[in-house]
Image (spheres, helix red, strand yellow):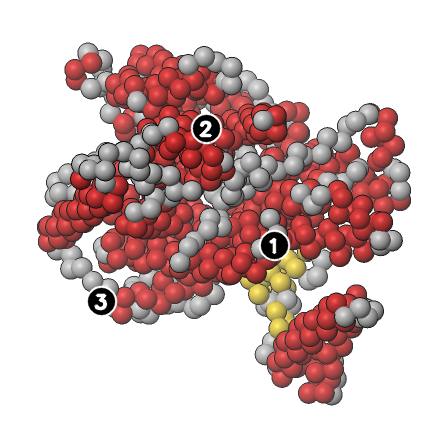
Amino acid sequence: MRAGQTVTTSGRAPRAAWWGNPAVRAFIWQALLVIAVISLFVWAGRNVAANLRASNITWGFGFLTEAANFDITGSLIPFRAGDTYARALLAGFGNTLAAALVAILIATALGFVVGVARLSRNVLVARFAAAYVEALRNTPLLLQLLVWYNVVLKSLPGPRQSIALPGGLLLNNRGLYGPWPVAAPGWSALGLGLLAALAVSIGLAVWSARRRRAGRAPLALWLLTPLVFIGLPLAAVWLTAGTVAGALPVTWPELRGFNVGGGVTLLPEFVALVLGLSLYTSAFIAEIVRSGVQAVPKGQREAGRALGLREGQILRLIVIPQALRLIIPPLAGQYLNLTKNSSLAVAIGYPDLVSIGAGPVLQNTGQALEVISLIMLIYLALSLLTALLMNWWNARMALAER
Amino acid sequence: MTMTPTSPACASTPRSAPAQTTPARPPQPTAGLLRGLRGLVSTPVNALLTVLALAIAWFLLRPAIEFLFINAVWSGHDRAACLAGEASGETGACWPFITRRIGYFVYGQYPEAQRWRPNLAMALCALNIAAALWPRAPYRGAALFAFVVPFPIISWILLYGPGFSGLVTVPTNLWGGVLVTLVISIVGIVASLPLGVLLALGRRSRMPFVRAASIVFIEVMRGVPLLAVLFMANRMLPLFLPPGVLPDPLVRVMVGVSLFAAAGMAEVIRGGLQALPKGQYEAAAALGLGYWQMMFTVILPQALTLVIPGIVNTFISLFKDTTLVTIVGIFDLLTTIDVSSRDPAWATPVTVSTGYAFAAMFYFICCYAMSRYSAAMERRLAAAGSRS
C-alpha cells in the first residue's frame, strides 16, 4: 500500500544512480528536516536567552514556590494571598475541572434528549430540536457566554427579590444558591452506601449478562438497580445513625439582611460558564447521537421484530448498544473540546487555569514562557489521556469482521 | 504509540474516511402536511410532546420576537430614541445603535475615504471563493491556486497599502470589526491548506522522523485550547524572535490561528487520503510517477475533493473561533460591539443586548449558509461515490 518511493526502481537498468535509490533519498530528506528543526530550535533558544537577558528575567520554574500577592474568589481549592504560585495554578485547574465536569453532565443529558427529539416522528418536536441545534452550533461560544453573563444573569433581580426555584434554590444577580450538607456521620454513611450500591449494581449487570449468554433468563435489572440504589444508602444511614431524616442535616440558603446566606453559592461566572458550555456542546452531542442512532441499519430492527422482541427490547438490546459503539468515540472528543473551551472563562472572569495562569500569575512573575508552557502541558496531558482511553476502547469495541 | 484522531474540531468533521461515515441525512418530517399534523396528536404521548414543544416555544420565542421586532426601536439619532420605550416598560432592541454605527462594526477605524479598498478585497474574495467552491465552475483548480497565492498578496497590498503601491498606508491598528474577523479567518484557512497538506502527507510518510515531527505538531496543536495558542503567539512568539523584532499584533494572532487551523486541516485531509482506494496509489506507481507527481496529479486532487465538506466545516469552526482574538486585544466584531456599547451617547439598558443580537445574526447567517453548502456537497459526493 505504500507506493511512495519504493516502487520506482524495479524494472529499470540494474545500475541506477545513487540518488535514485529511495532509501538514500529518504535519508537525505530526513537529515535535511532534522537539521532545519534543530537550527530553528537553536536560533529560537538563542533569541529567548537574549530577550530574557534584556528584560532581566531568569528562566526557570523557581517562581512556582514563591508567594503570590493576589486572592482568588470563588475557587474550589481555597486560595489566599501568600499561597504559592503553584497552588494558584492548581486552584485554577481545579476550577477548570469543576466547571467542565458539571457542564459535561448537563451537556450529555441535554444532548441525548435533543438528539432523540430530532428523530421524533412528531414534526413539531423534530423541528424544534433541529432549530435548537442549528442556533447553538452556528453562533460562537464566546458570544453565547457573553450573552449568558452580561445579558441574562445581569438582568436578574437583586438578592432581596431572589427568584425561588424548586428544590430550595435561590437565583439572583449574585449567583445561584442551593442547599448544602452539613458534615455529619450520616452523610459519610450515605456516600459509602452509594459506592456500595454502584459496585453491587455493576455486579448484578455482569451476572445478568452472563446468565443471558448462558441461555437463562436475565435478571430484572430495571427493578433491581433502582432498589439497590435506594435501599443500600438508606440502610447504611439507618444503621449508622438509627434514623434517616435527622441524620442528614442540610443548610438552606435564605435572605439575611441584604444578601443571601447559608447553603452553597455558585458565582454568576460559574453559572454562566457552565450554562454556555453545556448548551453549546449539547448541540454537537445531539448531532452525534442522531447520526449514531440513524447509522444502525434498518435490518437490525427488522431482525429484532422477526425474533419476536418487543419494541422496548429492540431499542434496549439491539439499537442502543450498536448506536453507542458509534457515539462514544466522538462523544469523548466533545468532552475534550468542552474542557478546552472552558478556557473561554477568561472572558467572563471565572478563575480557571488559563485566566489565572495568563492573568495574575503571568502578570506578577513575567515568566511568560514557563507559565504558557505549563498551561499547554496540562491540557496536552488531558488530551493524551483521553486519546489513550479511546484507543483502548476502540480496540475493545472493534468488530471482528469488516 | 499511535494516536487516532479522537477529537474532531467540530462534530461534523469526518472522524475517519468520509466515504464511510457519511452521516445519515436529518429526517425530513414534512412528507405531507396533513400526515404531519395528524402525527402531532396521534398518541397521548405525542400530544403531550406537542403541547410541551408549544409551551417551550411560547416561553423562548415570544420574548425573543418581542425584543427583536415588536418592541424594537427602528430609527433615531442617539440613545434618547431607545430610552423612550424604557419608561413604558417595554424593552426592545435599539436598532439605531447598529444602523448608525454599522461602518465602525464593519471596518473599525479604517479611514472612510479608503473603505473602497476593503470593499474591493471582500468582493475579490467572494468571487474567488465562489469560483473555487461552485461545483460546476470551470478552472476550479486555478481558482483554488489563485485563492492561496495571488489573492492574499493582492488583498494585503489593497488593505495595508505599503509604500510602493501608491496607496495611503492604513496601519493594522485602524482595522477592525467584520473586516478583521474576515481577514483573520481567511488568512487562517489560506495558510492552513498548504500546511495541512504537508502535515497530512508527513503523518502518512514512511520516514520515521518526518512522521514523528508531523504527529507531534498535530497532536500538540489539537490538544491545547486555541486560547492557549493565542496567548503563546501573543506573549511567547516575540521571545523567540531576535531582540527588537516585534511583529504587528494582528500578524502574531494570524500566526497562532494559522498554526492551530493547520493541525485541524491536516486531520481532515488525512481522512481524505485514507479514504482513497489503494488502487489509485498503485495505478499511479504503475505509471512510474514519482512521489510528488503522484500526489499532485493523482492523489491530492481526489482526496481534497472528497474532503471539501470537512474543509468547509473546519472553516466554520475557525470563523467562530476568531471571536477569541478579542481576548488578546484585537479589534474584531465582538470588540467593536463591546467598545461601542460603552459609548455614553448610546448608553441604554438594551445597548449590549442589541449588539450581541446583531453579532449573533451575523455569525448565524454566515455559519448556517456554509454548513448548508457543506451538507449539500456531502450529498453530492456521496451520490457520485455510489455511482462509480
Q: Which image quadrant: the N terminus of chain A?
A: top left
Residue under label 1, please give it: A399
Residue A348 horizontal side relative to residue B42, left or right: left
Corner quadrant of residue A176: bottom right
Q: Classify 10 Å Cα crowding around label 1: few (below 14), some (14-19), many (20 and above).
A: few
Residue under label 3, please give it: A62
Q: Give the chain of mark 3.
A: A
SS state under label 3 = helix
Residue under label 2, please give it: B302
Q: Which residue appears at 34% of the width and 57% of the height?
A: A377
Q: Which amino acid is tagged 2?
A: Gln
CA distance for labels 2 and 1? 29 Å
Residue A207 or residue A287, whichever sits in front: A207
| Furthest-front residue in this view | A14
Q: Which amino acid is tagged 3?
A: Gly
CA distance for labels 3 and 1? 51 Å
SS state under label 2 = helix
Residue A252 or residue B155, whichever sits in front: B155
Q: Give the chain of mark 1.
A: A
